[in-house]
Image: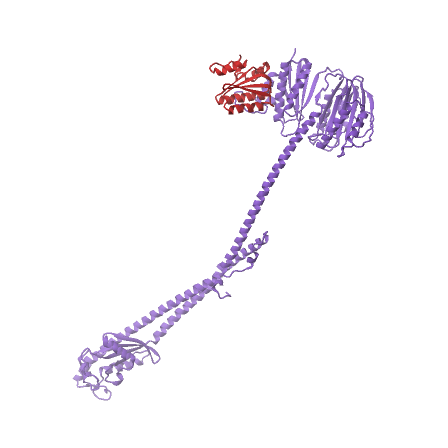
Chain colours: A red, B purple
Amino acid sequence: MDIIEDKQGAIVLLGLVGRLDSGTSPQMEEKVLGLLAGGAKQLVVNFARLDYISSAGLRVLLMAAKKLKASGGVIALCALKPHIREVFDIAGFTAMFPIHESEALALRSLTNMDAPWDARG
Amino acid sequence: MRRLDFQSWSIGAKLIALTVPLIALATMVAAGLIYQHDVTKVNDKLEHRARSLQHQIMADRAYYASVVVPKIKELEGTIGVDYKEVHGRFPLPATFVREVSEITKKLANGYTVNLLSPWPINKDKGVRDDFHRDAFAYLTANPKGQFIRNEVLQDRKVMRYMAADIAAAQSCVNCHNAHAQSPRHDFKLNDLMGGLEIIIPMDQYVDETRRDLFATVSGGVGLCLLVLGIMALGTNRTVRRPLKALAGRMAAFVAKEDAKFMRPWAPAQAAKTPIGDEATHITATFERMQGVIVTQQNELREANQNLEQRVIERTDELRRTMEEKERIGSELRIASDIQRSILPRTFPPFPHRQEFELYAETIPAREMGGDFYDFFLIDDERLGFVIADVSGKGVPAAIFMAVSRTLVKATALTGVGPDECLQQVNRLLCPDNDAAMFVTVFYGILNAHTGMLEYSNGGHNIPYHLGRDGRIAMLEKSAGMALGIADEARFETKRLTLQHGDALFLYTDGVTEAMDSGDCMFTEQRLEEVLQRSHSATPAEQIHGVVGEVRQFSAGTAQSDDITVLALRFGKASGAVREDRLSVTLTNQLTEIERLSVIVDEFGGRHGIPPKVLFEVNMSLDEVLTNIISYGYADALSHDIIVRLSCLEGTVSVEVEDDARAFNPLTAPEPDLTKPLEERPIGGLGVHLIKTMMDALEYRRERDRNILTFRKKFAA
C-alpha cells in the first residue's frame, strides 16, 4: 500500500492507495504513530484510492482516532468508496469517525471547529 | 619437658613452674612471718616473765632487807656471808636472793638469778662478760630500763635479762658502804648499786618455734606437691590432651587438604615442628591451616572465575547457535514455502477444459518433501501428468525433486513421447548425480479428445485404472527403472484407451507403506478397498477419501514418508449435476491472502458473481485466514490451508480447512466497540463483519482440522 502525505497548514493529509489489510496495516500504524509523536493534532485520511479494507485496517484507524482524542486532536475520513463505506457501516465505525464526501469538505470541517462534522454528507 | 628452655615446656609445666614457686614463696614468707611472730611472742613472754621475776625478787629482797634484817638486828643478830658457820649470823639480802635462785636453777628449765655489781663485795659477783658490761653501760644511762639479750650459754639458748639494782632502802646503802670489802663506800639512796641478772633458758621455746616453722614449711611443701599433682593431672586432662587432639586434627586436615591441591602448599614448612608449648604448636598448625584454607579459597575463586568465564563463553556460543538455528529455521521455512508454491495447487487447474477432471495433493513428511506431482497442457489436445518419488526425504530430496521436476516438465513440453521423455531426463540426471540420488517417475499423456493414454514408468508404483463400471486394476507394467541410476537405462511406452467415466489413481509409496502404531502397513489391498468404495466420486472426493483413510490408519504415529496422490477422470462423473468447485491450497503466509483474492475474483467472474459479493467474500476470507495464519500455529513451520469455493444455483459457498489449533470463531465474544482497542485473537470485529456480510457461518472440527464454512446468495 502507498501512503501519500501532504500538509495544509497544521492539518496532515494522508492518501491511501491499494489495500489496507493485515499485511499493510503495520505500515499505516507506524506512519500514524510517527505523526503523533511529531505533534500532529489534525489528521485527514483520503480513501479515494483505497480498494480494500479488512478488520486489521479498521483497527489501525480506531487506534489512530483514540490516540488523537487522548492528545486533544481530531481525525476525519473522506472519499470512501461504496463498499468500503459499507464495511464501516457494518462495523459501526461510521458513528465513530467524521466521514466526509470529499477532501475539501473534510478540511473545511477541521478549520472550522465549531461546525458539527457531517457524517453522511 | 625434655629441653631446658622454658619456651618449649608444655602449658601444664609452665603453669606448674609459675604456680608452685609462688606457692613455695608464699609459704616461705608465711613461715618466716609466723616464725618471726613466734619468736617475738616468745621473747615478749620471757621478758614479761623476767620482769615479773625481777619485781618478785626485788620485792622479796626489799622485804627481807627492810623488815627481816632490822628485826634480826633488834635481836642482836648479825648479817654476814659466813652465816652458815657463825651462830646468830643471817644471810645478806643478796645472799638470800642468790640461794633461792640456786634452788630454782636446779629445776628443769629453771631460771638463774644473779645479783652482781661493778663494785662487788663478793669478787665473783662482779662483771664477768660483755653482756654485763654492756648491760651496766646501758643501765647506768637508763636505770629504769632493762637490758635484754639472747645468747647461747653453755650450749643452751637463753634470754639474759638485766635490771638495775637500785639502792631502795637506806639500810642497804649503809650496809654496803660499811662493808669492808665493798669497793665503794659512797652509795646514796636510789644509786645504781648493781644489777639483777635473770637468765631464762629458751630451749623449749626455740624448739617449739622451730617445730612450728618446720610444720609450716612441711605444710607448704605438701601443698605445693599437692597443687603440682593436681595441676599436672588437671592440665593433662583439660589442657594438654584436648590441645593435642586439636593440634592433631588440624594437622590431619592440613595434610589431607595439601594432597588435594593443584599446587602443594608450602610443603617444606609443613614438616617443621615449632618450638614451644601446645598453644604455640596449635597456633603454628592453625597458621598452616589458615594458609591451606586461604589457598583453597584462592583456588576456588580462580576456578569460579574460570567457570564464570566458561559460562559466559558457552552462553555466548549457545546464543549464537540459537541464532544460527533460527536463521536456518527461517531459511528452511522460506525454502519450504517456495517448494510448496512450485507445485500447482489450484483446482481445477484448467477450468475451461471440461473433458477431464483432475485433483492432486502432496503431504511431505518433513518441512521439505521429495515427492512431486505435476500436470500441464502440452498442446490443445494433450494433458501431461506426472507423479514421482525422490529417494530420501528432507532438504537433499527436495533439491533433487526441484531439479527432476523441472527437467521432466521442460522435456515433456517439447512434446516427446513418455518413454523418450524419461530417457532424456534420465540421461540428464545421471552424470551430475554426485549424491547418487534417484527418482521414480510415472509420466502419462492423456489425449483429451480421444481418451488415448500413453504412459511410461520409471520404477514407480503402477497406478490404478478405475473403470466406470467399478472395476479396479493396475495398469499394465512398463519396463523401466528409476531415473538417475544408469545412463543407458531403457524405457517403454504403453498405450490404453480410456472410456468416458474411467479414472486413473496415481500414488507414491507413502500411501501403501504408511505405518500404524502396531507397525502394520496400509498396503495396496486397503488402498484398493478405499478406491472401490469411492469409484464414482470426483477426483477430489476420492483423494480426500484416501488421504483421510491413511491419516486415520496411521493416527498416533509420525508420518514416515511423503504422501502424494493424483486422481484423473476422463469425462464427467456420471449423472451428478456439476457444482463448479475451486480448490486452492495456500501456505500459511499473509501474502497468500492477496493471491487468493485474485483467484476468487477470476472464479467470480466466470460465474457472474457481483463485485460487491466478491468483495464481501474476499473480506470474509481475509478475516478468517488472517486469524488462522497469525494465531493458529504454535510452531514456525509451513502449513497448508485449503480453501474451497463453489457456486450452485446462485449461492456461493466457501469452505476453509486448516490444521491449526482448535478454534471456533462462533463462540468468540461479540466485540464491544466502546471498549479501548485490544488485540483479540480472532478480533471479534472480523467475525462480526463476516456474520453481517454473509448469509450463514458454520464451524466444525473434523479429524484434527478446523472447517469453517460460509455462504452468500447473490442471485435469485
Asked if B54 appears above or below B502 in the picture, the reply is: below
In percent of width and height, residue B433 lies at 76, 33
Question: In the rendered view, does B312 fall on the left or right side of B173?
Answer: right
Which residue is at 53% across, 53% downward?
B291
The percent position of residue B481, horizontal first and vertical second, equals 81, 30
- Whether B172 is drawn above or below B240: the answer is below
Q: Quadrant of the C terminus of chain B?
A: top right
Looking at the rendering, which quadrant does residue B514 occupy?
Answer: top right
From this viewpoint, which residue is outermost toward the top?
B716
Q: Would residue B595 appear left or right of B51 to someone viewing this image?
A: right
State the residue in front, B303 or B620. B303
In the rendered image, residue A5, in percent from the top left (x then y), is placed at 55, 20
Task: Report x, y in % for residue B318.
Answer: 61, 38
Q: Is residue A99 visible?
A: yes
Q: Is residue A115 above or below residue B152?
A: above
Please report the residue visible at 81 percent of the width from the left and 17 percent of the height from the top: B450
Q: Is residue B534 visible?
A: no
Q: Is residue B475 left or right of residue B224?
A: right
Tell whether B406 sits left or right of B591.
Answer: right
Q: Quadrant of the rendered structure where residue B654 is?
A: top right
- Residue name at image x 36 percent, y 73 percent: B208
Residue B245 vs residue B134, the one in the foreground? B134
Outermost residue toward the left? B74
In this figure, what is the number of numbered marks? 0
Question: B42 and B419: which one is in front?
Answer: B419
